Image (cartoon, rainbow, N blue to C red):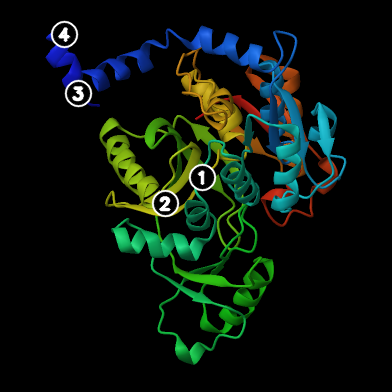
Amino acid sequence: MDIQNARDELGYEPQYSFHEYLEDYKKEQKLKRFDRLWSQKRQQAFGGENMKCDIAIIGASYLQLPLILKAKEMGFRTHVFAWAAGDVGEKAADVFYPISIIEKEQITEKCRQIGVCGICSIASDLAVVTVNYAAEKLGLCGNSMESTYKSTNKYQMRQAFKKRGDPCPESLLVDDSFSMADLDISFPVIVKPTDRSGSRGIFKVERAEDLEKAVSMAAAQSLEKKALIEEYVCGEEYSVEYISFKGVHSFLAVTKKYTTGAPHFIETGHLEPAPIDEATQTRIKAVVEHALDTLEIKNGASHSEIKIDSSGEIRIIEIGARMGGDCIGSDLVRYSTGYDYLKMVIQTACGEVPDFTKDKDTVSAESLFIFSQADLDELERLRREEPQNLLRIADLHPERIGAITDSSNRAGCYIRTARR
């Protein structure tokens, strides 16, 4: 800014440097003294106190239900998009649109017509693509499509990690036409689709003669019909939950992960906070924050899956630019930290600073999944004998017992106070 005239005519000399301005701005961000005024102005902009701001939510399954309910609690009118399948989110939405979550152009145009102030989703990599595509086209808060490509395609993620020195397994990109003669690998390996989540199409392969079938099955699950053959990494499994806004990453929790093990590694439960020491947590945060920058994740939730071996080495398995599924983000973070993670997701989607107010007492909690009649019996016992320890039943489909193939068709999920 040219202030020479003010100097010459008024004898003015600035007493406030740009550095001081930034320091004051940082203080104001923490004080949030204008939040109430901004809220009032937003209400006025959308027609007064009785008029709600419109928000789009991509997906309608039980995993999205807490997000829909939270948005309604915050005073938003919810516009939910998903393939019509009778899911709980269809009824919970203020307005439901039977449009598949992968129809990003159609959803974007509808959101443009509605005039949404934000678009978000949780627990779905497929939904992330549509969320960020629409946010970019509509000038809303999200992540770039370049970031989206790297965070939803496991091969591109591995390439980005390799380029920037982030610790991850070695991997090879293949399709179902690959030849064993072209490969120089040691067993066991993990085979997985390049672009799916929820344990779909994942196999641990111990012998060369089983590799071709595993690749064929994994590639069939992939949207681009490709698979990764990865080095098998030993160690304890964890996930790391973050919220980011304008490139600043804020740590929330580390979660201990339990699975069925080989060959498909379907998740059976999660414990939060994870039983790790402060030094390990500090190392985890450094690794994950560097990787978030590698993937250019600047806004919203993230869910990083890692393994730590017996020597303490940390390896990144993959990172999703969205809240963790399996009730990790929607329930466990809230119980174990007191932070309202769902509220933060909605706030960042609307371009607002996430609120780190702790609004509830904390308790160690775990999510448990139903695979067998014994699991269902344990839930019934808990409901009958220890109701104070049963925090929420998130989903229940006992008819699926005996037919579970991946995370999407488990027979139920409930949240309880931690036993471990």
Q: Which of the 4 image quarters holds residue 388?
A: top right
Q: Secondary structure at mark 1?
A: loop
Query: Alpha-carbon distance for marks 1 and 3?
Result: 32 Å
Circle nearer the N terminus (2, 3): 3
Secondary structure beneath label 3: helix
Give the foreground label among 2 and 3.
Answer: 3
User: In the rendered structure, are the residues bearing label 2 and label 3 in contact, judged by CB atoms less than 8 Å apart?
Assistant: no
Where residue 305 appears, as percent x and y from the top left, is 46, 48
Amino acid type of the residue tagged 3 in the rendering: His
Residue sticking out furthest to the front: 9
Compared across the picture, whether 403 is left or right of 244 comes to: right
Pick the front one: 205 or 395: 395
What amino acid is found at the position of numbered circle 1 in the picture? Answer: Ala
The residue at which mark 4 appears reads as 10
For mark 2, give the secondary structure.
loop
- Residue designated by label 2: 295
Q: Can the viewer see residue 260 in this picture?
A: yes
Q: Is residue 384 left or right of residue 235?
A: right
Q: Residues within 10 Å of mark 2 (few under 14, many from 20)?
A: many
What percent of the width, then of the height, locates residue 219? 63, 72
For marks 2 and 4 on the same chain, the one whose residue lies earlier in the sequence: 4
Q: Earlier in the sequence, mark 1 or mark 3?
A: 3
Q: Nearer the viewer, mark 3 or mark 4?
A: 4
Query: Mark 3 = which residue?
Result: 19
**Residue 321 got which mark?**
1
Pointer 1 and pointer 3: residues touching (CB < 8 Å)?
A: no
Q: Identify which residue, 71 or 341, lies in the foreground.
A: 71
Mark 3 → mark 4, Cα distance in angstroms: 24 Å
Residue 365 visible? The answer is: no
User: Looking at the figure, which quarter contains the N terminus?
Assistant: top left
